[in-house]
Amino acid sequence: DNPHSQGNLCPRGQSGLMNTYDPDRVLTPLIRVGKRGEGKFRKASWEEALDFTASKMKEIKDKYGPEAMVFSSTHNLSQVQFENLLYAYGSPNYGTQRSLCFNAMIVANLTTYGMEEPERIYDEKLKYIILTGRNLMEAISTSETSALSHAIDRGVKVVYLDPRYTKTASKATEWLPIKPGNDLAFHLALLNTIIGEGLYNKQFVEKYTVGFDQVTQEVTKYTPEWAEPLTGIPADTIRRIAREFAAAAPNALAHNGWRTSNFVNSFQTERAITILNAIVGNWGTTLKTAGSEESAALGAPPQPAYPRVSALRLDGVPWKYPFVPLKIGVFQELRNGILAADPYQAHGWFIARQNPILSLPDRQKTLKVFSQMDFIATVDIIMNDTAWFSDVILPEASYLERYDPLLPIGDKVFLRQPVIEPQGEGKSALWIYKQLGERLGLGDYFQYKDEEDYINQQLAPLGIKVDDIKAKGYAEFSEENPVGEESAEPTWNTASGKIELYSDALTKSGFPGIPVWEEPPQPANGQYYLLTGKVAQYTQFGTQNNQLLHKYSDEPRLWMNARVASQRGLADGDWVNVTSEVGNINILLHATEAIRPDCVYMTPGFGHLSKGLTTAFGVGASDSVLHVTYTDPISGGQALSQTFVTVKKA
Ligand SMILES: Nc1nc2c(c(=O)[nH]1)N[C@H]1C(S)=C(S)[C@@H](COP(=O)(O)OP(=O)(O)OC[C@H]3O[C@@H](n4cnc5c(=O)[nH]c(N)nc54)[C@H](O)[C@@H]3O)O[C@H]1N2
Ligand SMILES: Nc1nc2c(c(=O)[nH]1)N[C@H]1C(S)=C(S)[C@@H](COP(=O)(O)OP(=O)(O)OC[C@H]3O[C@@H](n4cnc5c(=O)[nH]c(N)nc54)[C@H](O)[C@@H]3O)O[C@H]1N2
Ligand SMILES: [Mo]
């Protein structure tokens, strides 16, 4: 009944049992005994590990102030209590995965619609969709992937832009192997045609948007002929797609993408996409306001107000990045703040459910930052690469063994509950954060006895208890506890109250108020764009040690265009050496037609440093070793496809 999974599991869900039964699970707290990174740990009791962690965190706070402690975590169900610990402790330094992922899309939506991300509607009405590097068939979002599959069955036209021929390309009506970094030129040319030929929705534009004239004026120069050499897509094709898209509107959708962190111009690309949607008037047909994961209808334990934060953040939000929400941040830039001690020196790092050693670009830089820390604690279920370089590891129980805070979706609220006894001594994050909070003298912020009591306090306004929903797994909000009405007339949380095609806020901050062409950097002769991208059977940097998933996967290889490989005297299966400005690796070559000649591609998440991952260690190589850190000055998104590499026989 969960609208996300709809009763289906993808390969990772099917293999989830081996997440719990991984022989490499960390099943007791561990404290480092050898040098950092040497991998020598001793088992500790929870008492000792928690006392140790809290005493270190207290020492840092007392000596240097709470800002000297960095907290980072990737979005998950217990995030709300992670944030509670962070805010109660009083540090402004919060690292999330967002800027590695979708900051460009979020900030574009915020500046245009005043919301982070609208929900996309894939019902029978949808006739036409443009996917800009959104590989939905492999980079799975369960409900959306299945919605797109059904839409394809119904005959929706899919235009897919990706320098690689992915599984989504194979299902698309049209695959456009666009030159990396030039999606902005493609979308500006769509705007040029649709506006130039008067194919936009005049009524909608007039009633609900501001800045149409400025956009019109700017895009006049961005003709399909102008975009052809930049994108590698014929002008006629661009013009035809613009006409088809407008003709299908409002049953047309230009997808915002998700991991939109490809180039420093990705923010402008994202703005162009949001504007394209706005001017064809698809609001309410293929786009709508998204439901919230936080529900006002749920209760929460009582707690005092948080202490005031008086220090600036190390990642430059908002003093360098005024448009980036504090809860999102610019994670990759945090390291420069730490290395330069600007605005101050950081001393400790508390990490939960995150693997920054692999997920941040330029692994050597992250390792350098780690080496400067007085103290690092990690909450994980396995000895991931980040845990390997930590001083203490606090093992969480796996998702089949624990409770988490409730998840509201639409008019329901879903329960994660233990379905087996925890192995070893793994504990829930709810428990771990409360224990730490109490030891830090912050017990007032954690007024719940145990996990069930926490959930009962959440459910209190609904007049039910956790026992009432265990069998079904969810509760429905009753009439007396509505989730909130949707208003008939759309409103947007922008300064003008309308969709801002032109953003005054951007202009006043010194950025272009409308999307303008920004030339992306290009590889020099002999260099290739290094592309990264998800595969269906792995999640990020966390499932490579799953024995089931491993069993059905090949050794990850570097994709290179077959013609280019043969010209270079390289053959499929050769070992090659790949070098960027910041690192180099050896990897097996995969010569294939499925990629542009100017690109190579690597699956992320391999090349682990942790010998505590006996299945994954020694398999493949890490693209994070190669990635140079580039950050978009507006959205704070990293730019992963902007790393250029050379390739030679190893
Ligand atoms: N199985 C699986 N599913 C996942 C995840 C996972 O790890 N595993 N992760 C989830 C997460 S957190 C996210 S953010 C989403 C990501 O979802 P997506 O953003 O769809 O996935 P990615 O694979 O990161 O990137 C998509 C494609 O962008 C292409 N690309 C690179 N540079 C450019 C460019 O300049 N222009 C264009 N047009 N394309 C380019 C790459 O070749 C790649 O195929 O997936 C989610 N779903
Ligand atoms: N090269 C490259 N870099 C990228 C990307 C890319 O495509 N290529 N993608 C970017 C994107 S889109 C994102 S979202 C980020 C993701 O970056 P991260 O969030 O840092 O990566 P994950 O692998 O999702 O980290 C999850 C960690 O949680 C652990 N874990 C799994 N289950 C549990 C559990 O139940 N409890 C606890 N406590 N821990 C658990 C896993 O072992 C893993 O160590 O990476 C970004 N970086
Ligand atoms: Mo992501």
Image: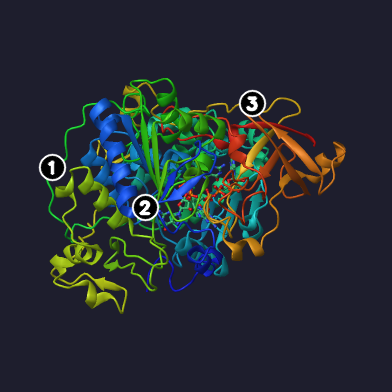
Task: Say which amino acid is labelled 3.
Answer: Glu
For residue 5, which numbered disc appears in the image?
Answer: none
Res. 181 in view? no
Instruction: Assign a secondary structure to mark 2.
Output: loop
Q: Position of residue 214 (x, y in %)?
A: 40, 29
Locate the N terminus by quadrant.
bottom left
- As measured in the structure, the alpha-carbon distance from the residue carrying label 3 to the one carrying label 1 is 47 Å
Residue beneath disc 1? 305
Q: Position of residue 2 (x, y in %)?
A: 37, 70
Residue 529: x %, y % from top left: 66, 35
Q: Residue at x 38, y 72 (%)?
A: 421
Which residue position holds label 2? 283
Q: Viewer-proximal residue, 394 or 118? A: 394
Q: Earlier in the sequence, mark 1 or mark 2?
A: 2
At mark 3, the secondary structure is: loop
The kind of residue on which mark 2 rests is Trp
Q: Which residue is mark 3?
A: 581
